Amino acid sequence: MFISFEGIDFCGKSTQVELLKNYLIKNKKKVEIIREPGGTEISEEVRNLLLDRKHNKMFTETEIFLFSASRSQLVREKIRHYLSENIYVISDRFHDSTTAYQGFGRGIPLASVEHINSLAVGDTIPDITFFIDITVEESEKRKTIIGETKLDRIEISDREFFNRVRDGYLYLAKKEKRFRTLDGTESESEIHKRIVKELDALEKRSCYDF
């Protein structure tokens, strides 16, 4: 199964990825964790370009192609292989981030974003996507704990940008049946319980359909 986690920065994705990984391993599942951008030698090099704050003159078009190039490599080098081996793949972000961040956030036409996403991932789409939703104000509160100097090029974007990104995720949550929206202000354990419940329900349906 291919599982992705989405949300604006500091929503708690990484924590839930780790909790789900541990849960699946305890249940005798083979699991691989991947992150976006990154996950392969080439993709990690692209990640460094994308997130380094010194590249503050990067154009929007350059940004979307770099994110998609990293993802394309990851899909073909690792994700498809893992899935063919019946391994659970958990991705900290995937192509929905491009729709939210570069489409809604940066203003690239959605038709162009959809075309680029399709070229990058083909038919390798998550079976289920957990969208951990928090307000931009909540994200900013959590950001102050991290400290400004530790933020990357995307994370230092302004409030208006992140409001548009969140709008993008809310749009996707209504549009895509695979999306499950979770309240990111709930406790870590409660969010994890909800994720496990949704995943178990999906697996049962899949077995029944088979």
Image (cartoon, helix red, strand yellow):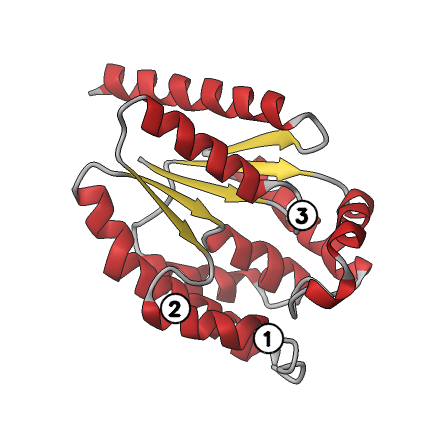
Residue 91 on image: x %, y %: 42, 47
- Which of these two is toward me, 74 or 23? 23
Q: Are marks 3 and 1 in contact (CB under 8 Å)?
A: no
Residue 160 in the image: above or below residue 46: above
**Residue 185: quarter of image:** top right
Mark with earlier residue (1, 2): 2
Please provide percent x and percent y for residue 157. Answer: 74, 65
The residue at the far left in this view is 85
Residue sitting nearer the eye, 55 or 101? 55
Q: Earlier in the sequence, mark 2 or mark 3?
A: 3
- Relative to residue 198, is residue 144 drawn left or right? right
Q: Residue 31: which quarter of the image?
A: top left
User: What residue is disc 2 on?
Assistant: 43
Q: Amino acid at mark 1?
A: Asp
How far across and how far down the image is residue 132, in percent?
Answer: 61, 37
Q: Determine whether the residue tagged by mark 3 lies in a helix, strand or loop.
A: loop
Q: Residue at x 65, y 82 (%)?
A: 54
Question: Label 3: which residue?
Answer: 10
* Front residue of this view, candidates 146 and 120: 146
Query: Are the residues at dot 1 and dot 2 in contact (C-beta closer than 8 Å)?
Result: no
> Closer to the N terminus: mark 3 or mark 1?
3
Q: Residues within 10 Å of mark 2 (few under 14, many from 20)?
A: many
Position of 124 relative to 64 (above/below): above
Cα distance in 3D space between marks 2 and 3: 22 Å
Q: Amino acid at mark 2?
A: Ser
